[in-house]
Image: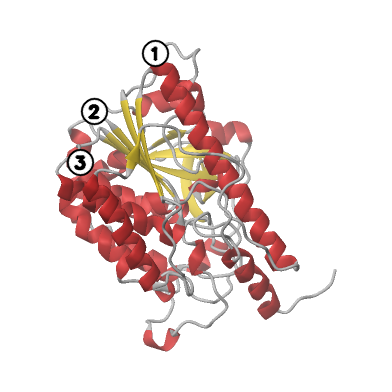
Amino acid sequence: MAHFSRLPVLAVAACALLALAPPVEWALAQQVTVVKKRAAKKKPAPKETKNEEQERTPFSAEEDEAAAIPGIADARAWGDSATDFARLLPQASGPWLAISGGGADGAYGAGVLAGWTEAGSRPEFAAVTGSSIGALIAPFAFLGPRHDDDIRKNFTTISAADIFEDRQTSDSLFDYWPLRRQIEQQISPNLLAEIAAEHARGRRLFVATTNLDAGRRVIWNMGAIAARGDDKSLKLFRDVLLASSSIPGFFSPVRIEVDSNGKRFVEIHGDGTLTTPFFALPESMLSASFPAGPPFTQLYVIVNSKLDPEFKMPDHNIPGVLGRSIGVALTSALRSEVALVYAGAQRHGIALRIAHVDPSFIYPSRGPFDGKYMQALYEFGLAAGRKGTAFGDSLPNLSLRGQNVQ
């Protein structure tokens, strides 16, 4: 096998992600770059990654199927199983909100939420779900308008250096310790107590990750985790958010200890968008054959992306072709999920409202987590939220012809 030095490998990886046409990248993918971050101005990377290199105890698919979080029976469910997920359903009634992935384009969703608040029409949701960058927004959206400014700051005051370091680890091309630190600073014990209180009222906060061992979607019941109220639950809460945003291969997967009939082992979890661009319900719960029907009559979806394919001529090399191919695949998956959820909503008489970045938004992005780009996109979402034009009640244009934009 040919040997490649680290720098060319990183260059290929970075270019592959940067070649994705915004906003269809995996969560936080826009920040990847081979340019050295200003590490001298940052604290040194924590030395906590050594534990992550330990070998794992082998386990079977059957053991993983039955695995649970020790001490928190309802911490999670398989996101592709209606029977399993039904255990976690909210006791409160009301609309649901699903927030998609989209990397730095999460600034759009942040703006929509703030504008929606200013319009005075934002409801209290019985459940809020998030995948990838949507997972990082979801806890604040769940707690309501008093946290709008926290979301705004997350998208208008950070840079790529606040997300990752250009340093290879044993299982990733980049080190996400800055993102881990950001999550630790934002997800405090007080915030967890607020979430636990809302969970006690019957509301639910769900976050999606991908179990890379099982190759399946996992939905985490974040309020149940918060309700445990100790240091272990705080760590698990933060780890789930980090896992949902961890681009496979580029960022390390997150190790989570589970118990299966007395056997302890460690699963690895990665980006939620691998198995769900956004999460509403297990697909079978939207089918005509599901006897109980969906547990809501209103569903709002914030898609942190444009849904139309955009014309782009990729460079005729490995990074260019690979990056463009990944972008096309992710756009296709997102559009398919929108169509599937729309069909289910029509079938069951659900009022579905979808917000997505309008094709009219055109603003140059000069690099990963470009502050001016994110500020412009935030303002774009804010205006749409204020005017009440963000959410449409019809199926967005999913024509494969898309927009002819260079």
| Kind of residue at disc 1 | Ala
Query: Which quarter of the figure is the N terminus placed in?
Result: bottom right
Q: Along the line of sight, which residue is nearer the eye, 318 or 180?
A: 318
Q: Residue at the location (60% across, 70% down)?
A: 14
Residue located beneath label 2 in the image: 94
Give percent across and percent down for residue 334.
Answer: 53, 43
Q: Is residue 42 left or right of residue 193?
A: right
Residue 64 at what x, y percent from top left? Answer: 56, 36
Q: Earlier in the sequence, mark 3 or mark 2?
A: 2
Task: Give the label on residue 292, or none.
Answer: 1
Residue 258 in sight: yes
Contact check, label 3 and label 1, Cβ < 8 Å: no
State the colouring used for the structure image.
secondary structure
Q: Name the front one of labels 1 and 2.
A: 2
- Mark seen at residue 122: 3
Considering only order in the chain, which callout, 2 or 1, is on the residue closer to the N terminus? 2
The residues tagged by marks 3 and 1 sit, at their Cα atoms, a distance apart of 28 Å
